[in-house]
Every structure is written in structure tokens, then in C-alpha cells.
Amino acid sequence: MAIIQFPNGIKWGSATAAYQVEGAAFEDGRGPSIWDTFSHTPGKVKDGDNGDIACDSYHRYEEDIELMKELGITMYRFSVSWPRIYPEGTGEINQPGLAFYHRFVDKLLENGIEPMCTLYHWDLHQALQDKGGWANRDTIGAFVTYAETMFNEFNGKIKHWLTLNEPWCVSFLSNHMGVHAPGNQDLQLATTISHHLLVAHGKAVQKFRELEVQGQIGFAPNTTWLEPFSSRQQDIDACRREVGQQIEWFMDPVFKGEYPQFMLDWFNKKGVGLQLEEGDLEAIRQPVDFLGINYYTGNLARYKEDSGLFDTEHIETGVERTDIGWPVYPDGFYKVLTYIAGRYGDIPIYITENGACYNDEPADGRVKDDRRISYLQHHLAALSRAIESGVNIKGYFLWSLMDNFEWAEGYSKRFGIIHVDYRTLVRTKKDSYYWYKKVIANNWLEV
Ligand SMILES: CCOCCOc1ccc(-c2cn(C[C@@H]3NC[C@@H](O)[C@H]3O)nn2)cc1
């Protein structure tokens, strides 16, 4: 066995999101989100699951925070349900909604856990969607108003903010592939939405600076890595396009002030363009204090004409896959991180999501999830290599603290290091919870 020592000062955390864990969907004035609509639409979510109850963390947050404290994490990433704060999407503020998040954040702070708040983790108010959602530029203003409310309300309590979680999922997965809410299948719509999301991000960062909010702000794109099957330029280019839809498409405008030409050219070939308004790129390129990176999986791929949006074909290599079907590819994590550091420089990075779906169930009060421990060992080893290569990693948030509503997969896919029995809502610490607790306590791991 080898020992991997992490640098002193790395923050160890875990993450969840409002719609996936809170439940209390109709309580204390919360308005309806697109995920309430989507999950209650037959055929959209596996087994007809929805977030009405979820893990009931709205009521059980004190128990959850006790589990965080025992785990030893020093940061916890959660998201705020925008429809709890603005039950109509805009207009009146719902004080009971704000009061819940004050209770929650105060309890975190009392237990020595720093909150990292994601403002937008996919639960757009249905009333805003009815007016076009992110395709309507008015939603940008509504988001900035919501962000301003949260900045003013929690200034000094919350010192790490994320504007958006996984804008690729919000735009392309949800509006081109139709897999997530609201379930559209229109590439031009998705591309327009991706731009409006970035403008909303930039304007929220501008507001953060204007209000002189204490702390730091960033955003959390998702990433993947596709290794070209051969050194043929067409294989290399095909991989770059599919990876570029998540990395360069969202990060170049923020860090370079422009969209990547190779992606613009490809979208143009597909008959899709961008309508930029005066000041959009200036708004988007607001300097952020840190970058959140979400990484789960990658693959080997090659060019295949007319295959998917980018003429790519993923190759079956026989490598292990998790219970959601994603290849286990820790080297891809290293490649994503070193690629991003090489392209965008020394931006501080938090790994805002990394983890694995394994559906192990309790037996005799224990959950033996060895495969998750192995996934985490290999991905933390890759993270350590990235740090040694000079990538400026500030912290790691394991996805997820507990099993929860995995979007279109419902409750059939478990990412937690704590098992949740959805009939009784009983939480059971998995073997991976105890393993992670030891990593945090030691700041090293054995591989
Ligand atoms: C049928 C075709 O399907 C094509 C790919 O379809 C997907 C689905 C889902 C994802 C996905 C899920 N997650 C995990 C979440 N990140 C945020 C947090 O809320 C986690 O629950 N990241 N990416 C990617 C691609």
C-alpha cells in the first residue's frame, strides 16, 4: 500500500442540492419549480419518482448536520431553492423561506462547518419557465434580483458562493437532449440558454462586487474527458468538440472573454448561432475568485460521421462502470484538471462534485460499498497527482453526503456515503463514510 499525503489546508467537504434532498415541496410558501412539474409528468422520471419528500432534509437538517460534524468535514455545499425565496419567481420575498436557510446556515456555523451556497441548482420557478425560462432574457434579471437578495441576507454568514451548477446540464442536457427539466429538444434553444446562463452568472458576479459582499464567488461547470482512440486528427478533433461543449464553451467566455472559435464553427455547421447583445461578453468575463469543477467520468472515443452532435463514438473498453453506467476513469480527472490549469492559468479550484453511483443496500446495519471506496481512492490519487503537477486545488466536495433524488433516474441511483431508506428516511452510514472520515482526519489516504 502507498500513502498519499494531501497539502495542509485542503478543505474537505461534501455536497447536496435543494431539490434532491429537502422535500417539503409545498411547505412554508415554497413555489413550484420546473423539477416539480417535470417529476410529476408521467414518463419523465424513473419509477415516477419526485422530490415531494426526498430525504426530508428540510425537517431533518439538524440530524444531517450532526452526521456532517461526525464525518469531520469543514465545508458543506448546498443549494438554495429559488422558489422558496420568490414563490412567484419574482416580486414578493417569502420570509419563511429565508428563515429556513438562516436556521440551516446558523446550525452549520455553530458546528464549525463553512457553508458553500449554490444559488442555482436547476430548480427554476415554473412561472419563469412559463414565460420562456432561461430562453427569455428577463430571467437573467430575475436571477440577479434573487442573487442580490441572498447576498444581502447572508453577507458575513456565507463566504463561498456559486452562481450556477453545471450550466451544460441546464442548457444542453435539458433543452437539446431533453433528459432533464424542462425536457426540450432544440439545439438552438439550448445554445441560446447557455449564453443567457453565462450572462446571468456574470451579472450576479458584478452585483456581488457592487455590494462588496464578504467572501468569494465562482461557478461550477461539469466536465468530462474523452481520450482520442488514435492520433488521427479527426479522432482528436471529435473528442475536443464533445469535451469542449462542457469545458471551453463555458470557461473560455468567463476566463478569456470570448466563445471558442472551434465550437462556434461547429455549431454554425449545425445551423446554430449566438445572438450577443451589447455588453454581454463584458458581463460574462467578470473575474471569479475560484472555479468549481464537477467530474464523474470519461472515456475513449473516436470520430464517427453523423454520430451524435459532435461525430463522436464512445468505445467500449471493458473498463469498470458504476451502477449508473458511467466508466470509472480516474486518469480523466487528472487530465481535466491539468488541461484546465494549462488553459486558464492559476485559478483556485474547488472540486465541487466527485463521486460514484453504487446501489449497495444495508445488511445487518452496515452498507458494504467497497466499489465506492475504490472509486474515491483512485480519484483522490488522481487529484493528488494534479496538485503535484501544480493545479491550485483548494478543496474537495464529495458527491454526495447522502443518497438523494438523482434527477431523471429518481431514487434508483445512489451516490451517497450515507444510505437513505426512502420509506422510513432512516440514514445509515456506509463503509465509505467511515473511510472518508479517516481521510479527512489524516489528510492522507492509502492506495
Ligand atoms: C440518455 C442520454 O443521456 C446522456 C447523458 O445524460 C446525463 C445525465 C446526467 C448527467 C449528470 C448527472 N450528474 C450528477 C449530478 N450533478 C449535479 C448533482 O445534482 C448530481 O446529481 N452530473 N451529470 C450527465 C449526463
Image (cartoon, rainbow, N blue to C red):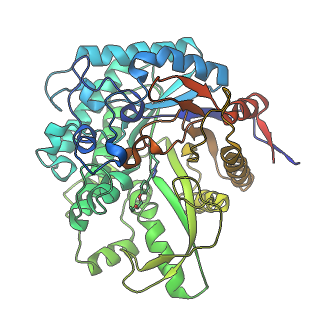
Of all residues, the one furthest to the left in this rendering is 131
In the image, residue 93 above or below residue 275: above
Residue 145 at x, y = what percent?
Answer: 23, 32
Residue 146 at x, y = what percent?
Answer: 26, 31
The answer to whether 309 appears left or right of 190 in the picture is: right
Residue 182 at x, y = what percent?
Answer: 24, 50
Please name whichever residue, 418 or 235, is drawn nearer the observer in this view of the structure. Answer: 418
> At 79% across and 31% down in the image, what residue appears?
442
The answer to whether 67 appears left or right of 83 in the picture is: right
Please name whichever residue, 254 or 419, is drawn nearer the observer in this view of the structure. Answer: 419
Residue 48 at x, y = what percent?
Answer: 31, 43
> At 28% across and 45% down in the image, what residue appears?
200
Of all residues, the one furthest to the front in this rendering is 364
Badge count = 0
Please name whichever residue, 46 or 431, is drawn nearer the observer in this view of the structure. Answer: 46
Please name whichever residue, 267 or 307, is drawn nearer the observer in this view of the structure. Answer: 307
Asked if one can make out residue 285 in the rendered structure from this viewpoint, the answer is: no
In the image, residue 410 above or below residue 230: above
The answer to whether 414 appears left or right of 90 in the picture is: right
Asked if one can make out residue 434 in the rendered structure from this viewpoint, the answer is: yes
> At 39% across and 20% down in the image, what residue appears?
58
In the image, residue 113 above or below residue 182: above
